[in-house]
Image (spheres, grey):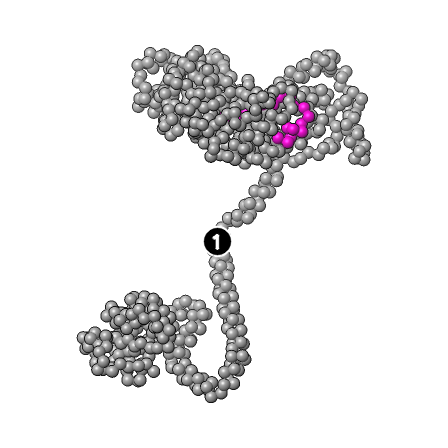
């Protein structure tokens, strides 16, 4: 039983109790607090007990460390007003046990909340939760507060003290099954909670409408299935039948493979065509010269299409030029080639499928007289592996455009239309590519040119890329070729140059050109300078003259002064590796890439500053004004496709002219402040004035940087 302090003793709580008019020992509630450490008691008292009582508790306990050991077995009575604080204290902490010591304190319904009201509040909260553990706890609390637990505890204590054997039986016989039972009950309770949650999910799934959303696993599986479906299937080394005709009526290689594999020969029937057409009356040597001219001498891009290989004939004069840019190998979002570079009805490969005799005489020229270009190093081994060994040995000329690092020097506006770029050459693809080159028996020429504005980066901060390039150049030096290997390689940057297109953000002293090349004495690689060129900016574009698009299947005329947009850049006419100082329009070559929306092809226009001449270099051909008018005359329904130029002022509304050459400083080019589809340069403005018949005097008096039309 708890100790009661005599009335004569000055207790710290007495002044506060007397001040509110409470008699000593009457109508007070004894609250016994069992706690394990002093810190929890302080936190509990500070948050739930009035400030006067809290100070009294601190004065009683203080910093006494012995209280931690005596607290579980000793009682400290704290008396205070129970009209409101006792009920709030019970609701806040269920660990506080409240009782009436000695039966002297009468707790009445009129003075304080009753135990029944407290238990009813607990019952309401248990019913709201609906949980089985809370219901069991509710039953235990009711049983404990009904004073049965005190009597039962005293009875058990007396029996155990009288009979020691009962205590042993309880510990070794009763408690183990009871512990097992409690553990089982706990597992059942947890399982029941999971069943309740699952039932709620099933009920929600059955009542709510289904959302047709795929899981991540399903999406990944479908992507793998699509990739396997669209990948290029490897062709068998043993073809079902021979397509090439030979003078003896059969192929020796084909006969040898049939005998080795033990397969029966495929019966083939061939009609002799040599005497049925006048073409075969021409001597064989002359026919070879004709076929070599028709099929050979081309630059063929090998691309990957869905379930097969593809080829694109490049129309550029020198595709290996580092300055050259083309869109022959543009890709879709999945990385597959999209046709746009050559009209379908003018492909040279159509000659091979016209006749089997022509195929037999032309097929060797197709592989031996053309240069095959690859923008992905993984395509070369796969392409050679899909050919017959006799055909693969005929391939002697390669052009490679590897990508060692992703371009970040300025925005690439082609991303709006070409969402997939060639992958960066990894170490695995590089090793595989070099192994194929070393094992290839006949290589006549090999030219390597990095993608424009996708250049070599070899700084001290990029050691992996530096080792990558060093291994690449040293292995290339060991490849045996008839002609020296041509490698486009940047020159040493000027120390003052920090931001250029060819040398992307390379601090002075970090480059070291000779450090990443073989020794000059043993070097077999022929280096080709990469001239400096400015980054591209997006700007408005006005077609300077009438052109016919070569990407369209049917002849399509693009009228002069048609408004669109273009990627503009320039390079010095001297092709120097460093940016020109105090450059003017007369010493640069302007380049404009515009997009033909009708067919999806790209067309390149050039302006020669020294000669002041416009020309089209790729994707289209120039036609005269009379030819364009004759093509459009008498055709109905072309007004919307070829709108006439009735009001020239409308096409200039909102356009501003700026000098592109003077905008090549570091801060303006890197931030792209003026790159917009509402800006044109001076050559474009002058060409537009000539097309609409305004002449050049108006352009000379017009001020730069002001809108042409408000």
Residue 164 rendering spot, x and y as whole percentages:
49, 85
Image quadrant where one finds the N terminus = bottom left
Q: Which residue is mark 1?
A: 209
The answer to whether residue 562 is seen in the rendering is no
- Which residue sits at x=61%, y=39%? 229
Q: Pick out the residue farthest to the bottom.
A: 162
Image quadrant where one finds the C terminus = top left
Residue 373 rendering spot, x and y as whole percentages:
59, 25
In this picture, which residue range is highlighted in magenta? 434-454
Say whether residue 79 is left or right of residue 529: left
- Which residue sits at x=34%, y=68%? 38
Q: Is 437 contained in the magenta span?
A: yes
Residue 203 rendering spot, x and y as whole percentages:
49, 60
Say whether residue 510 is left or right of residue 312: left
State the residue in front, 9 or 313. 9
Q: Is 174 contained in the magenta span?
A: no
Residue 289 rendering spot, x and y as whole percentages:
68, 14
């Amino acid at each position: 039983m708890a100790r009661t302090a005599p009335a004569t003793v000055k207790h710290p709580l007495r002044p506060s109790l007397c001040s509110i008019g409470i008699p000593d020992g009457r109508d007070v509630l004894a609250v016994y607090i069992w706690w394990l450490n002093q810190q929890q008691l302080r936190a509990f008292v500070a948050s739930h007990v009035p400030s006067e009582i809290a100070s009294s508790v601190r004065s009683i306990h203080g910093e006494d460390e012995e209280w931690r050991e005596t607290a579980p077995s000793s009682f400290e009575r704290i008396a205070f007003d129970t009209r409101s604080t006792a009920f709030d204290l019970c609701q806040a902490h269920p660990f506080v046990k409240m009782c009436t010591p000695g039966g002297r304190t009468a707790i009445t319904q009129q003075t304080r909340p009753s135990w029944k009201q407290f238990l009813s509040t607990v019952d309401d909260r248990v019913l709201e939760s609906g949980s089985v553990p809370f219901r069991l706890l509710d039953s235990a609390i009711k049983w404990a507060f009904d004073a049965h637990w005190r009597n039962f505890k005293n009875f058990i204590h007396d029996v155990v003290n009288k009979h020691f054997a009962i205590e042993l039986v309880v510990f070794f016989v009763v408690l183990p099954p009871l512990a097992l039972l409690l553990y089982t009950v706990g597992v059942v309770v947890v399982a029941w909670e999971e069943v309740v949650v699952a039932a709620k999910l099933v009920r929600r799934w059955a009542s709510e409408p289904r959302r047709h959303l795929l899981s991540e696993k399903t999406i990944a599986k479908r992507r793998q299935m699509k990739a396997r479906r669209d990948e290029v299937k490897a062709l068998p080394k043993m073809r079902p039948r021979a397509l090439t005709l030979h003078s003896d009526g059969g192929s020796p290689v084909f006969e040898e493979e049939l005998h080795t594999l033990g397969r029966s020969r495929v019966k083939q029937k061939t009609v002799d065509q040599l005497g049925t057409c006048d073409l075969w009356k021409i001597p064989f040597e002359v026919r070879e010269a004709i076929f070599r001219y028709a099929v050979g001498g081309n630059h063929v891009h090998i691309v990957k299409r869905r379930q097969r290989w593809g080829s694109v004939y490049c129309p550029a004069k020198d595709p290996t030029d580092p300055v050259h840019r083309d869109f022959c190998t543009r890709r879709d979002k999945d990385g597959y080639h999209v046709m746009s570079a050559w009209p379908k009805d003018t492909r040279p490969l159509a000659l091979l499928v016209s006749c089997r005799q022509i195929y037999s005489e032309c097929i060797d020229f197709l592989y031996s007289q053309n240069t095959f270009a690859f923008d992905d190093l993984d395509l070369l081994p796969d392409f050679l592996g899909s050919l017959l060994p006799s055909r693969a040995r005929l391939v002697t000329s390669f052009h490679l455009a590897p990508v060692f690092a992703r371009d970040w020097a300025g925005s690439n506006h082609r991303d709006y239309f070409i969402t997939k770029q060639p992958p960066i050459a990894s170490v695995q693809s590089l090793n595989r590519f070099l192994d194929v080159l070393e094992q290839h028996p006949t290589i006549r020429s090999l030219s390597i040119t990095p993608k424009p504005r996708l250049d070599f980066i070899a700084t001290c901060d990029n050691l992996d890329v530096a080792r990558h390039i060093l291994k690449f150049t040293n292995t290339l030096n060991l490849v045996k070729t008839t002609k020296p290997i041509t490698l486009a390689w940047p020159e040493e940057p000027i120390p003052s140059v920090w931001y250029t297109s060819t040398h992307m953000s390379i601090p002075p002293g970090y480059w070291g050109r000779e450090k990443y090349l073989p020794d000059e004495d043993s070097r077999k690689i022929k280096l080709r300078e990469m001239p400096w060129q400015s980054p591209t900016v997006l700007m408005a574009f006005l077609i300077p003259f009438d052109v016919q698009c070569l990407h369209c299947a049917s002849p399509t005329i693009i009228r002069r002064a048609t408004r669109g947009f273009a990627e503009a850049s320039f390079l010095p006419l001297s092709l120097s590796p460093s940016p020109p100082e105090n450059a003017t329009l007369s010493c640069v070559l302007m380049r404009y890439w515009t997009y033909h929306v009708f067919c999806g092809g790209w067309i390149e226009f050039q302006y020669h500053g020294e000669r002041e001449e416009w020309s089209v270099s790729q994707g289209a051909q120039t036609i005269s004004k009379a030819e364009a008018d004759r093509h459009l005359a008498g055709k109905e329904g072309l007004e919307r496709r070829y709108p006439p130029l009735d009001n020239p002022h409308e096409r200039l509304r909102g356009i501003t002219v700026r000098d592109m050459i003077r905008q090549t400083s570091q801060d303006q080019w890197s931030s792209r402040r003026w790159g917009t589809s509402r800006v044109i340069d001076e050559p474009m403005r002058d060409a537009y004035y000539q097309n609409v018949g305004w002449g050049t005097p108006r352009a000379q008096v017009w001020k730069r940087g002001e809108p042409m039309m408000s």
